[in-house]
Image (cartoon, rainbow, N blue to C red):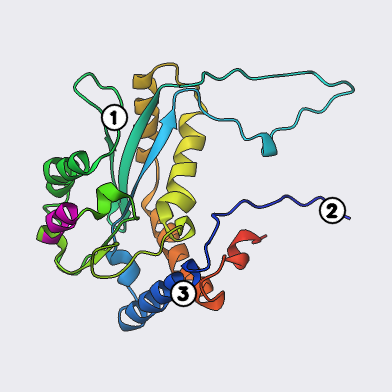
């Protein structure tokens, strides 16, 4: 016998399976027409990084003859930064930190999200050829507000993958987003290794961790997205068992 670990995945609702399958079918059709389609998508998302880091109890074991009674104290409301990044074949865009004039993290509402798009993101990509580039985003209300979609259309036209846009992004599908299945975990593993003690230290570590990611790694992550789309079709929009239990 061997020990096996429970795998945690995003809960899917019954209505999610057909929407995930429709998206996978659409993506496969695009890939059939253009085998470089996966290189023409700017994936994006936000994530919170808490100053206290995190401890994965599932992967943490202390071997000994007695229980060491080790506990780790964490504040109830730890300081944090809220980070936005884009990831595509050209590289990683960002990080952008959502914060006020005092450099304190703020909630990502629709107005702040649109300001980030107009004042920072669009300027960062203005030199790139975006005529056939797609922009997906999840169902956060700040992303899907009609005013936000109108702002995105100025750059991406009818190539927006989002609720209230041209192609629906399937809800609860973090397993199909490279930032969720790769970037945030990779950056957290690196930036917390040096135990940042201040918010500025944490921001510096995040920037450094992102800067160390090689172009070949990004290409591999995007090719993995293509594989995941195929598995999503096979599972009829269900969980990606071949990915979850990959050895």
Residue 76 lies, in percent from the top left, at 51, 21
Q: Quadrant of residue 51?
A: top left
Image height of 205 relative to 131, above or below: above
| 117 versus 19 height, above or below | above
Q: Which mark is residue 106?
A: 1
Provide the residue span drawn in magenta: 146-153
Please state the horizontal and vertical placement of residue 12, each as a whole percent of the image. 53, 61
Give the foreground label among 2 and 1: 1
Mark 3 or mark 2: whose residue is earlier in sequence: 2
Q: Is residue 137 magenta?
A: no
Q: Dot 3 surroundings within 10 Å: few (below 14), some, or many (20 or more)?
A: some
Q: Do callouts 1 and 3 mark residues in contact (Cβ within 8 Å)?
A: no
Query: What x and y, as percent, mark residue 118?
Result: 12, 45
To which residue does mark 3 refer?
A: 18
Q: CA distance from mark 2 to mark 1?
A: 46 Å
In this view of the protein, which residue sits in the foreground, 145 or 218? 145
Query: In this rendering, which labeled residue sits more in front, label 3 or label 2?
Result: 3
Mark 3 → mark 2, Cα distance in angstroms? 36 Å
The residue carrying mark 2 is 2
The quarter of the picture where the C terminus appears is: bottom right
Nearest to the observer: residue 98 or residue 90: 98
Whole-percent x, y for residue 46 in the image = 35, 43
Helix, strand or loop at disc 2? loop
Quarter occupied by residue 158: bottom left
Crowding at dot 2, Cα within 10 Å, few <14 / some 14-19 / many 20+, comes out as few
The secondary element bearing badge 3 is classed as helix
Label 1 vs 3, first from the N-terminus: 3
Q: Is residue 150 magenta?
A: yes
Q: CA distance from mark 1 to mark 3?
A: 35 Å
Left or right relative to 157: residue 138: right
From the image, give the main secondary structure of the stretch colored magenta. Answer: helix
């Amino acid at each position: 016998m061997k020990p096996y670990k429970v795998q945690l995945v995003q809960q899917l609702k019954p209505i999610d399976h057909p929407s995930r399958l429709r998206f996978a079918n659409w993506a496969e059709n695009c890939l059939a027409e253009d085998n470089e389609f996966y290189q023409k998508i700017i994936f994006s998302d936000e994530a919170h990084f808490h100053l206290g880091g995190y401890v994965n109890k599932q992967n943490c074991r202390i071997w000994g003859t007695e229980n060491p009674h080790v506990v780790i104290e964490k504040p109830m409301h730890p300081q944090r930064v809220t980070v936005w990044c884009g990831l595509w074949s050209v590289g990683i865009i960002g990080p952008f930190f959502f914060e006020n004039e005092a450099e304190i993290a703020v909630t990502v509402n629709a107005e702040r999200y649109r300001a980030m798009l107009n004042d920072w993101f669009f300027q960062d990509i203005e030199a790139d050829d975006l005529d056939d580039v797609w922009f997906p985003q999840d169902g956060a209300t700040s992303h899907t507000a009609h005013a936000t979609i109108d702002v995105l259309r100025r750059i991406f036209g009818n190539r927006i993958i989002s609720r209230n846009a041209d192609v629906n992004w399937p809800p609860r599908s973090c397993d199909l987003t490279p930032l969720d299945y790769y970037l945030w975990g990779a950056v957290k593993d690196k930036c917390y290794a040096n135990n940042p003690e201040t918010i500025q230290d944490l921001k510096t570590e995040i920037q450094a961790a992102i800067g160390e990611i090689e172009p070949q790694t990004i290409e591999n992550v995007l090719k993995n997205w293509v594989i995941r789309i195929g598995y999503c079709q096979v599972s009829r929009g269900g969980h990606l068992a071949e990915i979850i239990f990959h050895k």
